[in-house]
Structure formats: C-alpha cells, structure tokens
Amino acid sequence: MYNGAASGTLTIATYTAPLKVKFLSTVSTAGSAGTEWTTSGGYTQTAGGSTGGVSLSGNFSSAASAASKSNTAAVTVTNAPAQTWIGNEIVDSTAVTNKRMNWATITSKTVNAGDTCTIAIGSLVGTEA
Amino acid sequence: MTDRVPTTCDHCGQTDTHPKIHFGDGDTKHHDCLNFAEKTQVVESSDVAAKIVAACEGGKRGEKLLAHIESLHK
C-alpha cells in the first residue's frame, strides 16, 4: 500500500494491532472521519489514538474468500451512551493518530443510554487488494 | 424514564423508552424479543450482553433493567 513517500519509492504502510471499530454519530467519507461517540457508559472513545473503540482481535478468523473477509463474530457495545448511531469505521491502534481503513454508513438509529448496539456477523467486510 | 427518546421494537411493535438492542442496519428490539439467530450472536459476542438478555427474559423491564445494565458496568 503506497504511503506517500518520495517519487520513485514505494513504502508499505504498517498497521498497529489490534484493529478496532469506532462507533460514529456522523457519516465518514474518504476525506474525513465521522464524529466518534464520546466516552460514556460502556463505550470508550478512541480519540484517534491507541486505546478505545471495540477490538476486532480474533474477529476475522476465516480465510479470505473471493478477496474479501468479514467478521466472524458479532461486535457488541453494551450500556451505550445516548447517541445517534449512523456508521462505523475500522481503524488500527496507532498511538496519537489511528490509520483509517474502512467505514460503513447505516440507517441512522437513536440510541438511548444503556442500550445495546450490535454489528452482526458478516456485516464488516474488508476487501483485500 | 426521563430524557429518553421512545423507540419502537421491530418484533412486538411496542413503542417505549425501555432499553433496547440495535442491530446496525437491522432491527431494534427489546432484549427479550430477539429471534434465535439474533440472540445467539449477541450472547456469544459479549458476556455482559448475555446477562442483559437473561435479565430481560427473566422479567426485568424499564428502569429496573436500566439499573441492572448500569450495575454490570461498575
């Protein structure tokens, strides 16, 4: 994956495990990340750093098929904060600034404090280049 | 239950402010209104979620269920 190095060079981007899922209240685009839920209840904000979010460690255990992988276990946040849930991002755990990899927009949901939010098996899809 | 937005359960159709479970781009339901596949996914993904589902199926509703959820996170 080209990492913006000098012309004529190819730098492979490295990612810091674990990958994790951010829960968003505004939509992400290629140009900018959506607004992440704040830390409250059962959710800890990544704040773009190495902690927080919901870890995907061990969650993509099946071999790639047709150049794509999807999560093999549901991703659940309990005691969610009162927020709008409109999407998710997959990021790595790079300190200070996460590397963004993928994002998905869902039909907006109103989440009350204490609710449970679940991303079903197969709903997070990563496509291998 | 003050300061909560009423939401509708996509299984029983009841609109209330009771704690619910939201499936991304899927249904919103009471914790005891899940179908077999939904319940299996949820309880296998989170021990805390499994306890919440069990509490709701055991009769906890509304404020009592919310208090139980909060107690599981202390």
Image (cartoon, grey):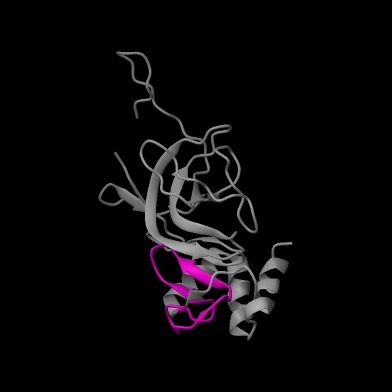
Residue B33 colored magenta? yes
Give the residues drawn in magenta, as a range. B9-34
Location of residue A89 in the rendering, given as x and y in whole percent from the top left corner: 44, 47
- Spot occupied by residue B21 in the image (x, y as percentages of width and height): 51, 70
Q: Residue at x 55, y 66 (%)?
A: A116
At 37% from the left and 42% from the top, the residue drawn is A29
Work out whether A5 lies above or below A43.
above
Where, by quadrant of the figure, is residue A48 drawn?
A: top right
With B47 as the anchor, is A89 left or right in this view? left
Give the residue displayed 35% in from the left and 30% down from the top.
Answer: A1
Choose between A3 and B40: the one closer to the eye.
Answer: A3
Tell me residue A97's x, y (percent): 53, 33
Image quarter for residue B19?
bottom right
Q: Nearer the viewer, residue A96 or A120?
A: A96
Does the segment drawn in magenta span residue B17?
yes
Looking at the rendering, which quadrant does residue B55 occupy?
bottom right
